Amino acid sequence: MTRASLAAALVSGLLAAAIAPAVTLAADAGPIPRLANGRPDFSGIWETLSNADEDLEPHSARDDAAPSAGVVVGNVIPYLPKALEQKARNFSARATDDPRLKCWTLGTPRDIYYPEPFQIFERPQDLTLVFEFGNTVRDIHTDGTLHPVDTDNEFWLGDSRGHWEGDTLVVDVRDFNDETWLDRAGDFHTEALHVIERWTLLDANTLDYRATLSDPNVFSRPWTLEVLLYRRREKNFHLIENYCFTLDYDQYYPYPAR
Amino acid sequence: MTTRSRALLTSILLGLGLAAALAPVAGRAQTAPATPSGAASPPASSEAANPPAAAVRGPRREKTVRVILSGPWTGKRLADGQPDIEGDWSNTIANQDNFTDPQGGIPGDPQARNRRLGPRSTRAPSRVSDPPDGQLPYRPWARALQQEFLAYFFNPIKPQYIEPFARCAPGGIPKSFYWHGFEIRQYPGYVLFLFNSGHRIVQLDDTPHLPKNIKLWMGDSRGHWEGNTLIVDVDNLNSKARFGRTGDFASENVHVVERYIFSPNGKRFNYVATFTDPTVYTRPWTATVPMRRYTVADQPNGWDYEVLPANDPGGPPIADHYERMCVENNGGFGQVAVSRAEH
C-alpha cells in the first residue's frame, strides 16, 4: 500500500469506526470479493496504469519512455558494480536486445506490470494467470505444496508457491532461467533470482502488488517494487490472445495469399 | 537448438514421450533430457522413436470410438452448477500425424518404408465422422492444396510447407485435442483449456463474438451446458494451424460448433465438432475425437499426462504441471524449422 492510500484507508477507517465500530477497515474500503472458503477472490482482468515496464527506476522523458518517478522503493535498484556495467550495456542496446521484441515470455514479475491485460482465475488450490502478451499461463499453487525438490529447474516464470497471510497472498517464486529482463531499460537478473510477491486487494477493483527481488549475482541486497493493478471494467471486456511470436511467419499460413 | 530451448530442455521435463511418439527427425531423440525427477529417457531406438502403427499399445492406441450419448448429467457438480469435469484428459487414438487415418502414419514418411500397414479396417476410424466415407469434403482447389502440402511435408522447399507446430505455433482447432494431453479447469462463467501449445478461455455466456476482422489461432469461444454436453461456438479463427501433418485445413471463414459429450462416470468424453466453411468444403463436416481422463492413479508420461508428483511431504498425492512452453519444436521436428527464435 502506498503512503497516500494508507492514509486514505486510515482516514476512511477512522470514519467507519466512528459511525459503525464493528465494520473492519477492509470492509470500509468496499467489500472485497471472496471465494466460498473466505479467501479474497482475485478473479478478473487486471492491468497496471503505471509505465513501470518502460523503466522501473525514476527517469526523465526520453525517446522511448515517458517521465516517471519509478516504482522502486528507495528509487535505486542496488546493483553490484559488475552487474551495473551489464545493465548499462543492456540499456544501450535496449532497442534491439529486449526479449520482449521477440515476444518471448516476459517472466516474473515483468508479466504483471507489462502494459497488456492479464486474467486471474482462482480456485482454493491455485491461481491461474493468463497473460494476453504471448498468451502465457502461470500457475500459483496455494495447496500447501512446496517448490520442486530438484533445484536445477530453469523456468521462464519461476515456480510459484503461495500462502495467505490474512487477506494478503504471499508467493515465493524461484527456479528461474536468465533469459528475461525486468523492463525495457535493461534491468536484469540471473538464474539465482528469487521473488517474493505480496498481493492485496485494496478494494474490489484495485490490487496492490509488491515484489521483493533478490539475486546475489546481481543485487547487493533485496529490493522491492510496487505497482497498483486495476480491474478492466469496460463492457464485455475480455482477453484477446496475442501470440505475437507467430507474426513473422503468419503470412505463410494457411496458404500464401493469392 | 536455441538458448531458449536449452534452458527449457533442462527444465521442462518429458522430452521422452515426445521423442517416442513424435516421429522425430534423426538426432532429435538425443536432445531429449532426463526429467527433473531424474528419470532417464527411453532408448532412442528406431522402434521407440517411431513405433509402427500396427504396434498398438497403451490407452492412446485404442482402435474404436465409444458412443457417448447426449443426455442429463448425473455426476458431480461444481458449486456454480457446472458438471465437474476438471482435470487431465488426452485422446485415446493417435497424434496428429494423419487426420483421416489417425493410426496410418504420415503418407510418404521415409522412415516408414519398411513397415507394412495392414488393412485400413485394422486401425482406428477417420476423425471425420461425417461424411460417412471419412473424407473431408474439399472443393477441388482445396484438395489439390492439401495434397501439395502433403507432397512437400518431408521436403519443405517453401515456408508454407513447414507445419506451423515446427515453429511453436499454437495448435488451433481441432489439432490441440490430439496433440498431447490437456487440462480443463472450471470457474464460475468459464471453462479454461490448457493445452501443450496454446490455451483457450471459453466464456459461458452469450456475449457477442469479437469483430469479424480479428483472427486468432485458438479462436473466440462462447459456451453453455446442456446436460452432460458442453456446447461451444467458435469464431474468429485464423485457420493457420493445420489439422495435422497431412496438411488438412480450413480457411479463416470457418465456423465451428463443438460438442463435448461427457460419459456418466466422468471418465470419458467425445469431442464432436462440426466445421462449416463454404470457402474450402462443399458441405459441413464433423470431427469426432475420443478422450479419456487421467488422474494421479495413472503413471505420468510425456504424452498424455505431462505431470510430476508435487513436493508434498506427508500430504496426498498431487500432480504438478510445470510451465507450458514450446521447447521441443525448436529442435526442428516436422521436418525443417527455421525460427526467428534464433535471434
Image: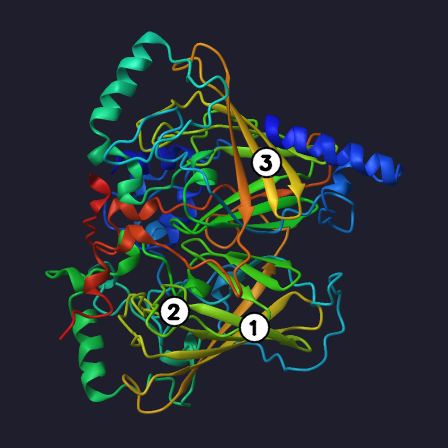
Q: Are marks 2 and 1 in contact (CB under 8 Å)?
A: no
**B144 lies above or below A38:** below
| Res B249 quadrant in image | bottom left
Q: Nearer the viewer, mark 2 or mark 1?
A: 1
| Res B252 quadrant in image | bottom left
Could you tell me which chain the residue with mark 2 belongs to?
A: B
Element under label 3?
strand
Q: Are marks 3 and 2 in contact (CB under 8 Å)?
A: no
10 Å crowding of disc 2: few (<14), some (14-19), many (20+): many
Q: Nearer the viewer, residue B312 or B191?
A: B191
What amino acid is at disc 3? Asp
Residue A4 appears in the picture as rendered: yes
What amino acid is at disc 2? Gln
Which of pointers 2 and 1 lies earlier in the amino acid sequence?
A: 2
10 Å crowding of disc 3: few (<14), some (14-19), many (20+): some
Residue B168 appears in the picture as rendered: no
Look at mark 3 in the image and give the residue it sits on: A208
Q: Residue at x 42, y 27 (%)?
A: A69
Look at mark 2 in the image and give the residue it sits on: B103
Measure the alpha-carbon separation of dots 3 and 1: 33 Å
Element under label 2?
loop
Q: Nearer the viewer, mark 3 or mark 1?
A: 3
Q: Residue at x 38, y 13 (%)?
A: A79
Q: Nearer the viewer, residue A188 or B239?
A: A188
Measure the alpha-carbon separation of dots 2 and 1: 31 Å
User: Looking at the rendering, in which quadrant would you find the N terminus of chain B?
Assistant: top left
Q: Tell whether B252 sits left or right of A37.
A: left
